[in-house]
Amino acid sequence: MIPRSRTVINEADIAALAGVPLATWRRRDAPAFRAHVPTLLPDSRFLLYDRAQTEAYLASKPIPDLPTGEHPTDLLTAKETADILGITPSTVQAYATQGYLSPGTTLYGARLWTRQEVHHRRDNAPGRGKGGGRRPGQPQGPRKQHPYAGDPRLDIAHQALAAAGGTPKGRVAAELAALHGSTPRTWERLLTVAMTATADAPNEQHHTDGNRGEQ
């Protein structure tokens, strides 16, 4: 996590500030630096550090503490986002690609989302939670065509079906579960819905064309 969207720096920048080549920095200086200044993203392969802490270390000054506690502008990794939403990091990435989450903010290759956005998605998931259901006294809106209507994973299921050829549905579902999270059984249901929608599409098009001819 990057607390409160603080300014970050990577090791290439640190080496430049220290006036040494990156390779020299990593071989000679990085071990001592890493022992005193922790990376902000310990669950990520990206080594990012707080700039104020880094500059204090390089100046041989006391390293300031980072802000504590949750804040709306905290920047969260895919794993931290997944933990809050109750899904897997790969599903977070899929949701961002499909529009269920925003693309987030990319810093030095690390993709991050604000705590405010993640909490909003958790608390306002379509069809459930705060803001997601029908309020008392409101007329009930049109029912979903199926339980997965509007689910961004349907697009993934459609793409998988198009590329599957004669691969059994169970095997495709298992591969999707491994790539994007959720259970193979859930992906089998999504694939079934996607197959039904694909089969119905020509009939819907024919019906629409017929109506046009009658006008």
Image (spheres, rainbow, N blue to C red):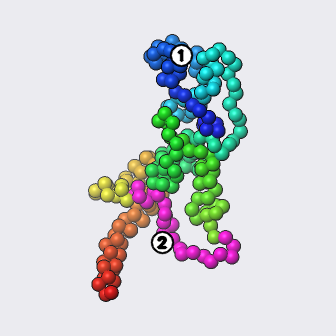
- Which amino acid does the dot numbered 1 rest on? Ala
Q: Main secondary structure of the magenta part?
A: loop
> Mark 1 vs mark 2: which is more N-terminal?
1
Locate residue 196, reporting x and y percent.
Answer: 38, 68
Q: Is mark 1 in CB contact (under 8 Å) with mark 2?
A: no
Q: Which quarter of the picture shows residue 9? A: top right
In the image, residue 195 sits, relative to residue 74, either above or below, namely: below
Q: Which quarter of the picture shows residue 33? A: top right
State the residue at coordinates (59%, 45%). Answer: 114
State the residue at coordinates (58%, 64%). Answer: 127
* Residue tagged 2: 145
- Nearer the observer, disc 1 or disc 2? 1
* Label 2 element class: loop
State the residue at coordinates (69%, 73%). Answer: 136
* Residue tagged 1: 18
Magenta span of residues: 135-157
Apparent side of residue 16 relative to residue 56 in the rendered image (left or right)? left
Answer yes or no: is residue 185 visible.
no
Apparent side of residue 89 relative to residue 169 in the rendered image (left or right)? right
Residue 107 falls within the magenta-colored stretch: no
- Which amino acid does the dot numbered 2 rest on? Gln
Dot 2 crowding, Cα within 10 Å, few <14, some 14–19, many 20+: few
Task: Give me the C-alpha separation between circle 1 and circle 2.
Answer: 61 Å
Residue 146 falls within the magenta-colored stretch: yes
In-front residue for pair 189/162: 162
